[in-house]
Image (spheres, rainbow, N blue to C red):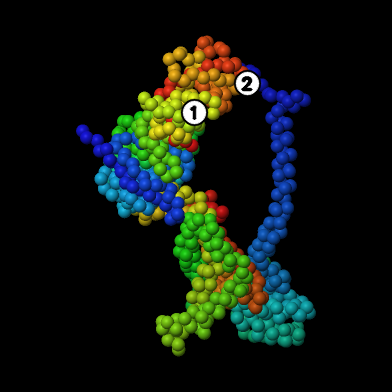
Amino acid sequence: MSVNKEFVKFDKVDKSYDGKVLVVKDLQLDIAEGEFITMLGPSGSGKTTCLMMLAGFETPTNGEIYLDGNAISSIPPHKRGIGMVFQNYALFPHMTVYENLAFPLRVRKIPKDEADKKIDKALSMVSLQGFAQRMPGQLSGGQQQRVAVARSLVFDPQLVLMDEPLGALDKNLRESMQYEIKHIHESIGVTVVYVTHDQSEALTMSNRIAVFNDGKVQQLSSPDELYEKPVNSFVAEFIGENNTFAGEVSDISDGKCKVKLASADILANPISVKGKGERTTVSLRPERALINPSDKMDNIHKGKIEEVIYHGDHTRVRINLLGNSEFILKVPNSSSNLDIKLGNEIKIGWNSEDARALDPK
Amino acid sequence: MSSETKQILTTDGIPLEVSLKKAEKKNKIKAFLLVAPLLLFIIITYVFPIGDMLMRSVDDKMVTEMLPKTFKSMEKWDGQDLPPEEVFEAFYFDFQKLIEEEREGKLSTQLNYTKNGFKSIIKKLRRKSKSFEEGNYKEQIMSVHRRWADVEYWRAIKRRAPAYTYQKYLKGIDMYENEKGQIINVPEDRRVHRILWMRTLEIAFFVTVFCFLMAYPIAHLLATLPMKYSNLLMICVLLPFWTSLLVRTASWMILLQQQGIVNDFFVMIGLVSDDNRLEMMFNKTGSYVAMTQILLPFMVLPLYSVMKTISPSLMRAGKSLGGTPFVAFWKVYFPLTIPGIGAGCLLVFILAIGYYITPALVGGASGTLISNQIAFHMKSTLDWSFASAMGLMLLSGVLVIYWLYNKLVGIDNIKLG
C-alpha cells in the first residue's frame, strides 16, 4: 500500500489581504495521506489563513493548492468535500444534533436509511449515542465539540480541518478531547490538518507539526524532533522552555563550537552557525542541565540559586549563571538534591551536544 | 430521621419559613411601589381612554333618556300591532317635555338615523300637539300624519330603547339591523367601509412585503460589512427617522406628482410620452411608495439586530459540509433570521394598518385607509361613537393578528433588538 505523500500540497502559496502585507509567504508544504499535521504558531502568524485557503474561504494571491493531485483554488468550498471543525463549533442552533449531522448527508442526497446508519456510527464514535434529538443549546461545551467533530466526519471526507477546536474548553476537558480526537484519527485514518496556538496540544496529537511565524513555516517535523532539535531560535523559544546565552563564535571544530560569552566560554553544537565571529544564541532545554554533574560533561559552570519554586513532582530553580539570571533548572524531587537552598552556589553541567548554537535573536 | 423534618428556627425563635416569607413580602411591596407609577401611567393614558372609547362606541343613552316614560310603557307591548293608548300617552308627555327643553330636534335627528322619515313627522307633531286635547292621545297623534299610524315607525322607536347598542359596529362593516331585527348588508352601491377595510389590509400587507424584500438585503449588508462602512449605512437607514414625517411625505409629493421629477425623468428617457404622464400620486401607488419608504427602518432594525448575532462561521460550516451557497442560506441562515422577520413584519404591518398622515396626503381617493375614515368621523361628522367603534375594530384586528402570529410563530420568538 503506497501512501500518497503529497495528498495536500501547498505550492509557493502567497496570501495578502490588502495588497501590501503578505500574511503567508511562499508557503511550500506537503501533507501525506492519513497524517495528523498541526499548524502551530502565535496569532497572526498565518496559520488560520492557510487553513481557510485550504477550505476554500480564502483564495491564494499567488501559487496553487493541490488536493490529491488536483488544483483546487478555483473550486468553491462546497465542492471540495473537506470536513471542517470550527473554533466556536458552528453547530446549527435551530437543528437537533441529528439534523446537524444529517445536513451534509442530505445535500449529498444520501438515502435516509443509509444516512441514519452513518449518523449512528458518527455519534457512537464520539460517544454521544442517545443525544440525537437534543438541540445544540442543551449540550455542554464538550458535547457540542464532539457533535462538531462527528458532523465533520459523518460524510466520510478524506480530509478534515480543525480550527482551534478546543480553544473554548476548560483544561481537563481539553486534554481528554485531545486524546479522543487523536484516537478517532487513528481509528479511521482520515487526514487531519489541525490549527492551534497551544504547543502542548500540538505535541500531544500530531504526527508532524508545522511551526508558523511571520507567514512562514519555521520548522516542519515530528513533535520530538521539534522539541529536541529546534532549527532556529524562534522554534526553540516557542516550543517548551528554553535557556539562552547570547555570544559570539570563537572557534568551530569537530562538530563543536566555542561560544564566547561576556564572562566565560561555553561549548555548543553548531546548528546554524558557519564560521568564526558570528553572533549566535545558544539554546539549552532546562532538563538537559544537571546539578552536581559528573566530570564527563564538557560544560561545567558555577551559579548562584536566586529562586526556588516548589512544583510537587519537581522543583524549578532559577539560577544566575554566566550572566544569565533567568537560567531555569528542573530538579526532580528526590532526596539527593537537598542542598538546593536559596543563595547556595552550585555546580551545573551539560553536554555541548544539547546546547544548540542557533541564529542570533 | 426526625431531625430532617424538624422546623428550622431563627435565633429569635420564629420558624425560618415564616420569617423568610415576611422578608419576601416586604420586597414584593417595594417592587410593586417601584412599578406603581408606570402602572398608573398606563391606566391613565391607555386603559382609561380605550375603556372610554369602548363605552362611547356602544353608548346609546341619548334617546333612552329623552323618552323615559315611552320606553317604560313599551315594555309590555309585543310589537305586533300598533301600541296601546298608554304608550301614545307616555310619548306625548315625553315629547312635551322635550319641546319645553327645545330638544325635540335632536330626537328627530336620532330617530331619523334609525328610520328615514321621522324628521318631517316630528316637526308636524310639534306644530299640531299644541292644540291636542286631553285624553285619547292615540287617535290624536295618529291623525297628525299617516306614518304615526304605521307600526314600523313605533318599532323603530322601540329599537332605540336599550341604553347600549352595537349598531355602530354593524355600520362599520356596512351592515345594519332592519325593522325585524335581522342583520343585513347595506345595498351594494352604499358600501364604503368594507372597501376601506379591505384596502387597508391589502396596502398594509403589500407594504409589509415590499419592506421585507427591500430590508432583508440591507440588513444583511449592515450585519456583514466592516464597522466603518456599516456605521455609515446605518446612518443612511436612520436618517429618515430624524426627518419629520410630513417633510418626507411632502418630498414624495414633489417626486411623484405628474409634473414631478420621476415623471420628468421617464419622459426624458422616453419611457412615457409627455402628454401621457403617469399618475403615481393621489392613488394607491402613492400610498405604497411613501409608506414603504417611511416604514422601511422598522423592518431593517429588527432584522439587523438578529442578523448581527448570527455567526458568519455558520454559513461557512454550511458550505464546507457541502451545501451550495443557496442551500447554506436557505437551510442555515434564513431560519435563524425568522425571529427578526417576525418582529419586523408584525411591527410594519401593525403600523401600516393604522397609518394616517401619509395616505391622507398622497393617497387621494383610492389610496386612503380606514384611519382616514376614522379621522373624518372625528373631525367632520362629529360621530364620535362611530369613530370609536371603528377604532376599536382596528384595535381588535391588530390583536387578532398578534394572536395569529403567536399561534404560528410564537411571540417569545420575537426579537426587537
On the image, which quarter does residue B143 sit in? bottom right
Q: Residue furthest top?
A: A335
Quadrant where the image shows the N terminus of chain A: top left
On the image, which quarter does residue A346 sit in? top right
Instruction: Please tell me how crowded label 2 is: few (under 14), some (14-19), or many (20+) other residues with Cα within 10 Å.
Output: few
Q: Is residue A168 visible?
A: yes
Is residue B132 shown left or right of residue B82?
right
Chain at numbered mark 1 = A
Q: Which residue is mark 2?
A: B4
Looking at the picture, how far across and down is residue B219, in whole percent?
49, 59
Residue at point 47%, 24% (across, down): A266
- What secondary structure is found at the residue carrying circle 1? strand
Question: Which residue type carries mark 1?
Answer: Lys
Q: Do the numbered discs 2 and 1 sit on residues whose CB atoms are within 8 Å?
A: no
Q: Nearer the viewer, residue B191 or A133?
A: A133
Q: Is residue B152 above or below residue A335?
A: below
Instruction: Please tell me how crowded label 1 is: few (under 14), some (14-19), or many (20+) other residues with Cα within 10 Å.
Output: many
Q: Is residue B342 visible?
A: no
Q: Which residue is mark 1?
A: A260
Q: Nearer the viewer, mark 2 or mark 1?
A: 1
Q: Is residue A343 above or below residue B110?
A: above
Residue at point 37%, 41% (across, down): A161
